[in-house]
Image (tube, rainbow, N blue to C red):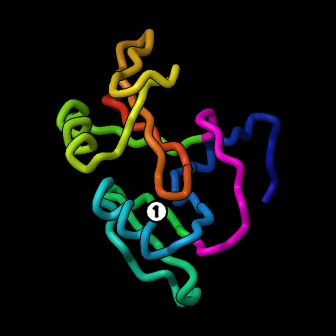
Amino acid sequence: MLFSATTASKDFNFRKDHDTIRVKDLKTSVDFYGSILGLEQISNGGLGDHIKWLQLNNGVQLHLVESEEVVEKNKGVHTAFNTDKLSEFMEFLRFKNIPFENWKGEKNTITNRPDGVKQIYFQDPDGYWIEVNDSKI
């Protein structure tokens, strides 16, 4: 196949497939992502018991790999989800005793982005940062 100067990456029609994270306790992480974010466990393609695949209702997957490897966590590197029920989700987090904060680190409050989107941040059992916002993408 020949490519020309006008070929652009958009011509490949990329779509989000999955993210992979390393976790210390696979069962704890599977339970967290299932019970807090509603991800459904699916077949892992025969990759072994140390790997679990989870899926959102739009087909995007999160792959969890059990490992003792330490990964540095930083709020600037996070996974983001959106919902049209952010207020209700915040109440759910409070009910589950999962602390959340805004970008600045102020507890139990939201960030109001300049474009009007509201967002919160919290951490999974391994300390990975998760953003949930009310974007209408």
| Quarter of the rendering containing residue 118 | top left
Spot occupied by residue 97 in the image (x, y as percentages of width and height):
29, 46
The stretch of residues the image draws in magenta is 65-77
87 lies above or below 98: above
- Residue in front for this viewpoint, 12 or 103: 103
Q: Nearer the viewer, residue 131 or 6?
A: 131
Q: How many marks?
A: 1
Q: Is residue 76 magenta?
A: yes
The answer to if 22 sits in the magenta stretch is: no
Query: In percent of the image, x 78 and y 60: which residue is there?
Result: 1
At 59% from the left and 72% from the top, the residue drawn is 65
Check disc 1 and report the residue beneath it.
61
Decide if residue 11 is on the left or right side of residue 45: right
Magenta span: predominant SS is loop
Going 35% across and 13% down the picture, which residue do you hit? Answer: 116
Q: Nearer the viewer, residue 51 or 23?
A: 23
* Residue positioned 58% across, 69% down in the render: 24
Give SS at disc 1: strand
Q: Quadrant of residue 68?
A: bottom right
Q: Amino acid at mark 1?
A: Gln
- 10 Å neighbourhood of mark 1: few (<14), some, or many (≥20)? many
Instruction: List x then y, in percent, for residue 99.
Output: 37, 39
Q: In this image, 17 relative to 137: left or right?
A: right
Question: Is residue 79 placed above or below 87 in the rendered structure?
Answer: below
Image quarter of the C terminus: top left
Provide residue 66's location: percent of width, then percent of height: 59, 75
